[in-house]
Amino acid sequence: MEDYILLAVGAILVNNILLIQYLGNCPFLGTSKSMDTAVGMAMAVVFVLALAGIVTWIIYYVFLVPFGLEYIRTLAFILVIAALVQFVELFLKKSIPALYAGLGIFLPLITTNCAVFGVCIINIDEEYKFLEMLVSSIAYPMGFGLALILFAGLRERIIIGRVPTPMQDVAIALVTAGFMSLSFLGFKGMI
Amino acid sequence: MSETSLVQEFTKGLWKEIPPFRLVLGLCPTLAVTKAFDTGFGMGLALTFVLVCSNILVSLGRKIIPSKVRVPCFIIIIATFVVIVELVMQAYTYSLFLRLGIFIPLIVVNCIVLGRAEAFASKQGIGRSILDGFGMGLGFTISLSVLGSIREIFGAGKWAGMELFGASFQPFTFMVEAPGAFVCLGLMLGIMNLFGKE
């Protein structure tokens, strides 16, 4: 049990996927301009990644390993994720319209979110067992959500401030992210 | 678009639309593999190969691929070339392969490649698509090499493995850690905006 808690804390804070592992930075900068979009994106990522992690893990160990096809995992995973996102979209539209409206345009964007694909690969590279994989597939996107929402809060304040013209928008956002990353680096000694 | 000359098609990737600065796309590898010059440069070359090849195939198939399923088709084309790069790098440049690690398979979801397929190669002829792929890839390689050089020189006091300063040099380790990547890229973007205003 302790191992799983450590793994979860490690994934959320110490190895934060956005700020320490640099995965999923395009949506990080793209959707952090306002709190609403940040929350929508964070929810969509948690939802899809939990599913994608499980499905790709099963596919890897049930279909690819027995036939010695490990080398096409890149191709297989991206297809699975793309199909899964489509499926989730259709399913939510039909059965939980409220959630679908909340996630909105962020669902299709997730196909090209490297955080999702990256965590699926990390699960395989670290040779996680099923339960460990489950914990990591939930904890990593929670770290993503945490960083994204905190950052959106900061960015809403920066827009009000007076930023020199060349540094406006993305440039100042990157520098801000740098200092946030510095604070997350402080968690390094925790585990 | 049709009036732009072939030369412009190539050079726009080098300054006017240089990735990842002008089009803020493909940031993850930019931040992650620029700890040193050689990883940045290797990543740039790998991406250039994928970009050129996928641009060729997308451009060839642009009349056959139905527009409704074009994105999955593009992704399959890109993923195929990424697998090729992965296997080739594993065979010939194993140490670089280990250092780039997870970011080689991640070229699949790199927005630059999919972005160029969608925005350029699916609408233009094959010649222009190749030039566009080379230009963009070269621009990306230059950006990554410069960023990697800056971070390596300040953060480790080396360039491409060579010691630059004497033993008394105190490395500025902030630059090779995660935060240094964000701050350095942000400042470079600011400097480029300062000079590149139209």
Image (tube, coloured by chain):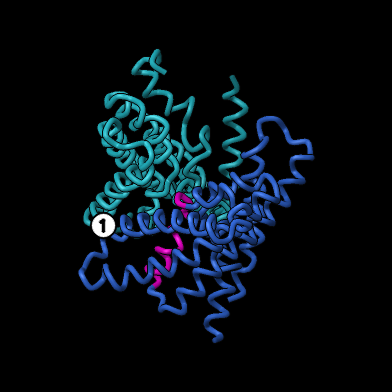
Chain colours: A blue, B cyan
Q: Quadrant of the N terminus of chain A?
A: bottom right
Q: Residue at x 31, y 42 (%)?
A: B50
| Relative vertical location of residue B104 with respect to residue A120 in this rendering, above or below | above
Q: Is residue A34 left or right of residue A103?
A: right
The furthest residue to the bottom: A1
The percent position of residue B92, horizontal first and vertical second, equals 22, 53
Residue A84 in the image: state x and y as whole percent.
42, 58
SS for dot 1: helix
Graded by Cα atoms within 10 Å as few (under 14), some (14 to 19) or many (20 or more), the crowding at tag 1 reads some
Which chain contains the residue that carries disc 1?
B
- Asked whether residue B70 appears in the rendered view, the answer is yes
The residue range painted magenta reads A111-126
Percent coordinates x, y for residue B43 in the rendering: 37, 46
Instruction: Verify whether residue A124 appears in magenta.
Output: yes
List the residue tagged with mark 1: B90
Q: Residue at x 46, y 79 (%)?
A: A131
Q: Is residue A3 above or below residue B20?
A: below
Residue A178 sits above or below residue A129 on the image? above
Residue that extends furthest to the front in the rendered view of this protein: A94
Q: Residue at horizontal 48%, vertical 74%?
A: A134
**Quadrant of the image occupied by residue B5:** top left
Asked whether residue A42 is drawn in magenta, I would say: no
Residue B157 visible in the picture: no
Q: In front: B75, or A143? A: B75
Identify which amino acid the numbered label 1 is placed on.
Answer: Gln
Using the image, determine if residue B41 lies above or below residue B178: above
> Is B20 left, or right, of B131 in this rendering?
right
Position in image of residue A9 (x %, y %): 59, 73
User: For the C terminus of chain A, which image quadrant?
Assistant: bottom right
Residue pushed farthest top? B3
